[in-house]
Image (cartoon, rainbow, N blue to C red):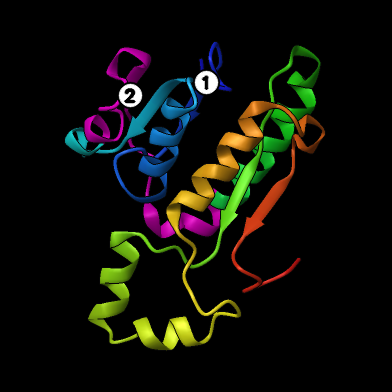
Amino acid sequence: MGVLTGKRVVVTGASKGIGAAIAGAMLDAGAQVVAHFGTDRAGAEAAVAGAPDRAELIAADMGDTRAVDAFWAEVVAATKTVARTHAKDGILAYVISPGVVATQMSVESAARTGGVAAITAGLPMGEWVPPEEIAALAVFLAEGRARHLTGTTIDINGAAYIR
């Protein structure tokens, strides 16, 4: 029995990177996972391969990626609304705001422009955030041991920026 046995979580972008790491960690912790993916069904299936009996895959277009800033503001606002409206029902909602994360996509993108070393040198900890650390934070939050954090945005960026 894992710490999340009996809990159901929704993970967006579960086909790769941070989302795949979170989906896998949630399954490892015993949760039932609704794993969202855009177009990469095989990636989402791989992310939940450890416990496919506790996973449900959902395909959905999350919109135009050029509107990331507006989308991010909407995510934060929606999280606060869900937290305030459903806290009494035991539904917890958080925004995890990652810094420079060592996903395949990020590293490849930085490598194309020759920026991996420059980005790394500019980080206070001298390293990119591992997706597994973000997944560990997500599992901790889902456990409900810090439930009064519901509605908050939690930065995980190695002191790259501090609010």
> Is residue 50 found inside the magenta-colored segment of the image?
yes
Q: Residue at x 28, y 61 (%)?
A: 104
List x then y, in percent, for residue 112: 23, 79
Is label 2 in a helix, a strand or a loop? Answer: strand
Q: Which residue is mark 1?
A: 2
Is 137 situated left or right of 132 in this image?
Answer: right
Relative to residue 71, is residue 89 depicted above or below?
A: above
Q: Residue at x 55, y 54 (%)?
A: 70
Amino acid, disc 1:
Gly
Q: Residue at x 29, y 35 (%)?
A: 47
Instruction: Give the mark, 1 or 2, whose residue is nearer the N terminus.
Output: 1
Q: Residue at x 79, y 28 (%)?
A: 84
Region of the chain picked out in magenta, as a range: 44-71
List x then y, in percent, for residue 131: 44, 53
Question: Which quadrant holds residue 120?
Answer: bottom left
Say few, some or many: other residues with alpha carbon within 10 Å of mark 2 (under 14 / 14 to 19 / 20 or more): some
Is 98 situated left or right of 17 in this image?
Answer: right
Question: Which quadrant holds residue 50?
Answer: top left
Say few, some or many: other residues with alpha carbon within 10 Å of mark 1 (under 14 / 14 to 19 / 20 or more): few
> Is residue 132 found inside the magenta-colored segment of the image?
no
Residue placed furthest toward the front = 1
Q: Which residue is mark 2?
A: 58
Foreground disc of the pair 1, 2: 1
Relative to residue 124, is residue 86 depicted above or below?
A: above
List x then y, in percent, for residue 98: 55, 58
Relative to residue 52, is residue 59 depicted above or below?
A: below
List x then y, in percent, for residue 61: 33, 37
Amino acid, disc 2:
Ile
